[in-house]
Image (spheres, rainbow, N blue to C red):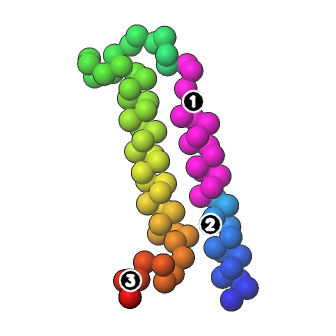
Amino acid sequence: MIKLYGVIRMRKFCIWSLVAILLVLHQDNWFWTDGKLVFGFMPVGLLYHAVISLAAACLWFAAILLIWPPGVDGEAS
């Protein structure tokens, strides 16, 4: 049981570290003045935010799989 607690604790640390990294990366000041278009129609800043959004969705999915506490998702009585 002690070993399992350490694994869960490490998973939580990794997930929250990745959340912090995504929060820092979300504050992009380098694409504000870039007028380049990607695929001929999409501003590079918009593509950047789309990629950040997909990364955030994948991270939350991983968080659900890896650190969601057991028994919380049971039916209401």
Q: From what the image shows, is residue 13 above or below residue 25? A: below
Give me the disc on residue 27. Answer: 1
Residue type at mark 2: give it: Arg
Q: Are marks 3 and 1 in contact (CB under 8 Å)?
A: no
Tell me which segment is drawn in magenta. Answer: 15-30
26 drawn magenta:
yes
Badge 3: how crowded within 10 Å, few (<14), some, or many (20+)? few
- Which residue is farthest front? 77
Q: Residue at x 49, y 83 (%)?
A: 71
Image coords of residue 7 (percent x, y): 66, 74
Pinpoint residue 24: horizontal percent, then vertical percent. 61, 36
Q: Main secondary structure of the magenta part?
A: helix
Please give left or right for residue 26 compared with residue 4 in the image.
Answer: left
Disc 2 + disc 3, Cβ < 8 Å: no
Q: CA distance from mark 1 to mark 2?
A: 25 Å
Percent x, y for residue 73?
43, 78
Q: Nearer the viewer, mark 1 or mark 2?
A: 1
| Element assignment for label 1 | loop
Name the residue tied to disc 3. Answer: 76
